[in-house]
Amino acid sequence: MRIGYYPGCSLLGSSREFDESVRAVSKAIGLELVEVPDWNCCGASSAHVLDHRLSLALPAKILAQAEAAGLTEVLAPCAACYNRLASARAALEADPAAAADVAAIIEMPVTGRVKVVNVLEVLDRCQAVIQEKTVAPFVRKVACYYGCLLVRPPKVLGFDRAENPQSMDRLMTAAGAEAVEWNFKTECCGAAFSVTRTDLVARMSGKIVADAVRHGAEAIVVACPMCQSNLDMRRPEINAHLGGNSQIPVVFITQALGLALGIAPAELGLQRHMVPALALQPSATV
Amino acid sequence: MSRIGVFICHCGENIGGTVDCGKVAEVTRNVPGVVHSVDYKYMCSDPGQNMIKEAIREHRLTGVVVAACSPRMHEPTFRNAVAEAGLNPYLCEMANLREHCSWVHEKGDVTTEKAADLVRVMVEKVKRNHPLQPIQVPVTKKALVLGGGIAGIQAALDIANAGHQVVLVEKSPSIGGHMSQLSETFPTLDCSQCILTPRMVEAARHPNITLMTYSELESLSGFIGNFKATIRRKARQVDEKLCTGCGLCTTKCPNKKIPDEFNEGLSTRGAIYVPFPQAVPNKPVIDKLNCTFFKTGKCKVCEKMCPTKAIRFDQQDELVTLDVGAIVLATGFKLMATDKFPEYGYGKYKDVLDGMQFERLASASGPTAGAMKRPSDGREPETVVFVSCSGSRDRAKGVPYCSKVCCMYTAKHAMLYKHKMHHGKAYVFYMDIRSSGKDYDEFVRRAIEEDDVSYIRGRVSRIYEEDGKLVVMGADTLQNGRPVEIRADMVVLATAVQAQDGSEQLAQKLHVSYDPYKFFAEAHPKLKPVETNTAGIFLAGACQAPRDIPETVAQASGAAAKVAALFSKDELTREPQIAVVNRLPAPTFSYCVGCFLCQSACPYQAIEQEEIKGRDGSLIKTIAKVNPGLCQGCGTCVATCRTKAIDIQGFSNEQIFAEIMTL
Amino acid sequence: MNSAPHHSSHGETLKAKVEQATGVKLNHCYQCGKCAAGCPVAQDMDLTSCQILRLVQFGDPAWDRQALQSEGIWLCLACETCSTRCPQEVEVPKVMDYLRSEAVRQDLAHPRSRDILAFHRAFMDSVRETGRLYEIGLVADYKLRSRHFLKDVMLAPKMYVRGKLPLLPHLIQGRDAIKRIFKRTLGSKP
């Protein structure tokens, strides 16, 4: 099985472990990732604030490049990239005039043929293989945190459900975990305010950490680099705000599943977290 | 020989201001067949009508064309005038010079020419008109009322008191409907069952009313005055003649875990049950889906215990066919359930209730005998939040309309709560307050001013559970959209009023129109609120649109009045412009070849089959026949007929072609 | 007779511009407040989403200015909670995006938008130059623009030792094409 792959900028840098774990898990389950050639940044949260047409053009260029390389589907692990690519694709499909405008801007055709999927969808498709190859069930209580961009706006993305989504919970349950029912699965972590309004991130991400802990979670599982960064890298600010010292680790879904598949923690980048996560590895292999 | 009289009306300035009526009258005099052509200011006035009558006598007219407004306005006026002068009224037609000419064109020669054309077209038609007689159809003076809630009960009582037989059909085991579930009613806070049960009993005891509970309409055929309704009387598994209503069986049933529908799932009942203590009839019913005997073959405790041996496990459904003349639809509404709200917990929070569940909680005959106890742990809720407009006025949820009654019942709920728990805190999140009935606004003000209910203007974005409390995330738009978070013990959602389940199927059985939300459609939104487009079927209550009890009762009486008017005659008169299959002498008998395309095309199922037999009884051919009681004269059959054997009286093919050819 | 099927707002009101640019029909908003009720940053906004929509919906230039000058529009992080729950299906984030760019165009942007804008501009500068985000470049650019020189200074070494801070930018091959894309859209906006 092969699929187009769009890592996105954060997977090359501050969320390198997401890229590492996606690749490691894909290799283990026989999924070939074909990277979109010479891919550019999708514009993330910044392009749409500054210029609407730019925010459509950058994703359109990526998809055009994918199509030119013969790809029909692109996996974008980063939730923001996934959302930007899918939203731009939908907006251009709905507005032929805008599509023509963007095609002229990027000097490439805008066809809408290439579909965009997120990491949860792809993992769900490979569920049988993952089950088969699980050697060390991830027996822990986890709070699955989806964030905003994987499930909203529901009419554009058409993925899972916008309130109390279940796809990640199902994946973790199948891997042996107990996915706790908690209240902040889709509350915003503070997103791009990480640098400019760290005070808001402390409060918003703080609520998420507190609720996960309150519901008995031993780890928070995420599928978005921004969320991971806010919940992990900004933990000192969160702890200061909450007046505590929470050390609950925050791992990517592919890291948790990777551990269940018996992949070594170093290959999954588990050592790269700010809040130590190495304790999550299985103590003995089955 | 045709002797047509033409009367052109100025209609004040409406026609005369744009069309040169004198000129039209002059030109029309030259049309072959026209012997009299005049114009006048107001043809519909008494002098105008007298002009027509005199002209008929003086000029021995064989047909009349009145060129004036739309026939929908004055056709009956002129036809009556013509009939008074001794001419068959169907020999009078109108040419519409107003809506079809003067009101849509500018003044000028071309417009006057068009008016003359319109008149000439009608003259050609009238030359080919035949005298017609209205059709008389007998009326069965028995009414069928579908639905035994307050609407159905009221309609049944009014029709019965007018001296006619009524069959009242209700699908649940008892009549009473949603009103029997309410605790108190606004704006008087009357105990709902106290004011309802006398009516229920009256309906059951009325000599003219036959009650069929635990029954549903199976099928319907026929037409106004002459319906044939088949009712399925579902098997109660109890012989009603032997049962005394002692209730022993209901206490002995071992299977007690079934969610009680009457209490909206807040309590449980047995498999053999009476829905509520004041049920009419007060006879139990066995819920076959959940009864241990029907599922596994073991038990029958109730049968053993029954002192009069009234339990009958072998009882079967019974199909009863009735001849009725009119039907009143009073099937009521349902409330949207709490599981339709993803942002409020998908229905999984036990302490998030809908309006009807709160009614049961507050009711003295409810699961807590009226005490305020929250369903999850039985504790008294110190803080209750009421959320108006839950699901209503919500395009995203597919319910853009307002459910009308929630503002009032929310105020009522808040007041009932405060009356039972003086120290409790009640909040209402609202968008608007719609309290337009008599004493209604004062009622809401009472909640705010005297009972200290806190009203916050804003919608609730999300409700979730934390540490045994329900966190309600709302906003106050009168304070800049300021977020307001309340940690409540219980939440009551005023959910949307929707059409009953099965409304669509019922409407299709009855050939009654319904709107996109499956509410039954009235014949005219302003002037015909209790009639449907299907002659003989009337509407009462919330099955047509969300409404409160006073309006429901008024509408039910209105429907009953229509039925009584229908039954006041022994025969019904119908317009004769209906389809007719041509008949010829032997050996042809008819141009109809019996293909029956018309039968499948007819939207009113008005085409029947007629066998033509020889003198020896052998079948010669089967041809189509139109039922004059059902046919609405739409002409679809005429269009489909390959041999042109079927035609509309008064709108024949020949007439229409003559009209076209004269242009 | 030739008449338009709907009376749509024409003319130069902000409301008309919003509708033109985003397709969002502001008349649909009935100020129920559900957006503000679920907005994670509503408590920090001077004017909440509900208020901002009302100001623009009204069609008065003074009210429009008030909306454009607010800090609230800069705090929206496009989490889409509001649009997901809005009973009238109003796409609030699209309106916010437009109001932000209009505020910049009319030079009315709230003073506290400076840092937020600085961040986004720094981000896009990096993308314009290399085709991808160069995190060190982003931070350096942001600090220069915002003058918050000491912000997160302790974070960089922590990230570096964990291998999360590449020292060199990734340069894509099609950089010229990217520059052209920028020229045609963001143009010479600072």
Image: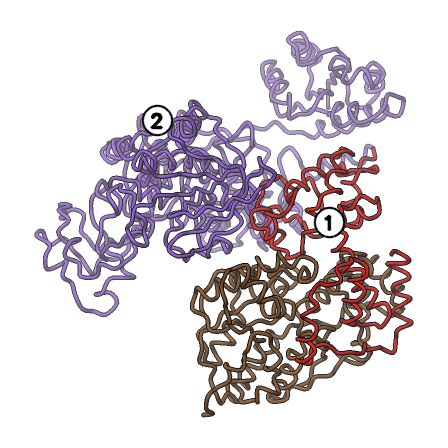
Colour that chain A carries in the picture? brown
- Color style of the picture: by chain
Q: Nearer the viewer, mark 1 or mark 2?
A: 1
Residue B408's place in the image compared with A159, above or below, is: above
Mark 2 falls within which chain? B
Image quarter of residue B98: top right
Residue at 47% in and 84% down: A137
Q: Is residue C147 left or right of residue B257?
A: right
Check if mark 1 and mark 2 are on a common chain: no
Locate residue C23 relative to residue B570 in the image: left or right. Answer: right
Residue B606 visible (yes or no): no
Q: Residue at x 27, y 57 (%)?
A: B287
Tag of residue B188:
2
> Above or below — where is C173 with respect to A42?
below
> Under tag 1, what secondary structure?
loop
Q: In the rendered image, which residue does mark 1 sit on?
A: C112
Q: Amino acid at mark 2?
A: Thr
Q: Position of residue C48 (x, y in %)?
A: 64, 44
Letter of the chain in purple = B
Circle 2: is it few (<14), some (14-19), or many (20+) Cα within 10 Å?
A: few
Q: Identify the subunit bearing mark 1.
A: C
